[in-house]
Amino acid sequence: DSGVTQTPKHLITATGQRVTLRCSPRSGDLSVYWYQQSLDQGLQFLIQYYNGEERAKGNILERFSAQQFPDLHSELNLSSLELGDSALYFCASSGSTGFHGYTFGSGTRLTVV
Amino acid sequence: AQKITQTQPGMFVQEKEAVTLDCTYDTSDPSYGLFWYKQPSSGEMIFLIYQGSYDQQNATEGRYSLNFQKARKSANLVISASQLGDSAMYFCATLPFGDTGNQFYFGTGTSLTVIP
């Protein structure tokens, strides 16, 4: 167990729908990152939150949004889903000191049908 | 932005042998970290090893070592005494150390298969 919890583990939904992916960071970590891993794009950074505020933005579509709540958990909202949004979505968290990298959750596998 | 290149899409190694997975990167950041992650078929990303750009010595973690050649912008992963459980995808990544966020840049990965 990495300490980063992602739910659900698997999600199957239809095109045009909206889903919410949830992430609880490792205890004490203030930063949360979201990544998308797809067959054609590889691992792509989507967005980072630090202590409730957006810190950095990557290749995140306008149909996607995220937020980090006061208890530091984060949610990634994906709307108007398309077949191409099918991917493994990772959340990761990091602390302010110590190890410079960060710890990944086990991912949410989204399948859009 | 940074570009990470892993030129070996697939590798095979005999059990108990050593294997080197290649990684080169292109960055203009003065300070950065280099990482290797393992992704087994179950999907999770498992941290293996870290090297800081200013570290003088190559990093080692158990059977994993990182052959860091800064001038060549190369950070190859060496796995010694391969085990069947090492069969997985391996990703090289860089992490610039700056003030505007800390996003990883990943390579496309190398699929390693350990043969009994």
Image (spheres, rainbow, N blue to C red):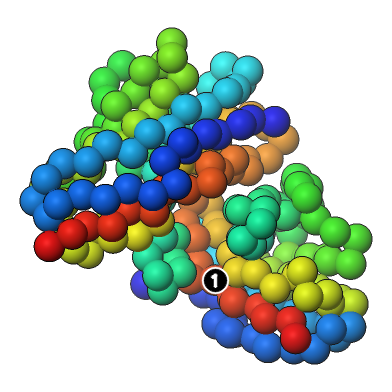
Q: Quadrant of the C terminus of chain A?
A: bottom right
**Residue at image point 70% right, 31% down:** B1
Quadrant in the rendering for residue A33: bottom right
Residue found at x 72% / y 54%: A46
- Vertical comparison of B6 with A46: above or below: above
Total tally of numbered discs in the picture: 1
**For the point 8% across and 51% down, which residue is it?**
B16
Identify the secondary structure beneath mark 1. Answer: loop
Location of mark 1 (residue): A107
Q: Nearer the viewer, residue A16 or A50?
A: A16
Question: What's the residue at 27%, 37% (across, down)?
Answer: B20
Q: Is residue A33 visible?
A: no
Question: In the rendered structure, which amino acid carries the disc numbered 1?
Answer: Gly
Left/right placement of residue A80 relative to residue B108 reads: right
Judging from the image, mark 1 belongs to the subunit labelled: A
Considering depth in this image, is B115 or A63 the residue closer to the camera? B115
Q: A81 or A104: nearer the eye?
A: A81
Q: Is residue A38 visible?
A: yes
Q: Position of residue B60 (x, y in %)?
A: 22, 36
| Relative height, residue B14 to residue A113 (above, below) | above
> Mark 1, residues whose alpha carbon is within 10 Å: few (<14), some, or many (≥20)?
many
Between B13 and A57, the one nearer to me in the picture:
B13
Vertical comparison of B115 with B19: above or below: below
Quadrant where the N terminus of chain A lies? Answer: bottom left
Percent of width and height locating residue B65: 24, 36
